[in-house]
Amino acid sequence: RARLLILTHLASHEKKEISFNELQQKLGFTSGNLSVQLRKLKEATYVEIKKTFKDNKPYTTIAITFRGAKALNNYLDEMEALIKALRK
């Protein structure tokens, strides 16, 4: 559920990248939980994580990859098909 929320938020966000802090605030995750979920998404190559510095402070941004967007769309297609089948 957490990873689905992250991918959905990234895919629907107006910017190409979102900061770790902004993503944490929007989704209401603890930094530890968000880090764990992002690591799993990165291992699956669904997100790209960039670590830089901004005003001499660590600054992390996250972006959904093409593979991540494709996986999300495939999941949504499967859910739509399941919902249609249940409504018959």
Image (cartoon, rainbow, N blue to C red):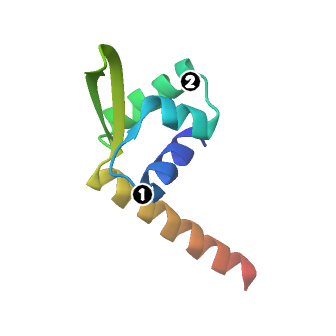
Q: Is residue 6 left or right of residue 66?
A: right
Between the C-alphas of marks 2 and 1, the distance is 24 Å
Mark 1: secondary structure: loop
Q: Which mark is residue 52?
A: none
The residue lying furthest to the front in this view is: 55
Q: Nearer the viewer, residue 83 or 70?
A: 70
* Precedes in sequence: disc 2 or disc 1: 1
**Residue 65: x and y, percent?**
29, 49
Q: Is residue 28 left or right of residue 54?
A: right
Return the residue at label 2: 33
Q: Is residue 14 left or right of residue 66?
A: right
Q: How many other residues sit within 10 Å of disc 1, few (<14), some (14-19) or many (≥20)?
A: few
The residue lying furthest to the bottom in this view is: 88
> Residue flagged by tag 1: what amino acid is it?
Glu
Quadrant containing the N terminus in the rendered view: top right
Foreground: disc 2 or disc 1: 1
The residue lying furthest to the top in this view is: 56
**Residue 15: x and y, percent?**
37, 52
Q: Residue at x 50, y 43 (%)?
A: 6
Q: Nearer the viewer, residue 49 or 18?
A: 18
**Residue 44: x and y, percent?**
33, 39
Tell me: residue 84, above or below residue 9.
below
Q: Residue at x 35, y 51 (%)?
A: 68
Q: Please say if the residues under marks 2 and 1 sit with CB atoms less than 8 Å apart.
A: no
> Residue flagged by tag 2: what amino acid is it?
Asn
Q: Quadrant of residue 87?
A: bottom right
Q: Residue at x 60, y 23 (%)?
A: 30
Mark 2: secondary structure: helix
Tell me: residue 4, above or below residue 51.
below
Q: Which mark is residue 14?
A: 1
Q: How many other residues sit within 10 Å of disc 2, few (<14), some (14-19) or many (≥20)?
A: few
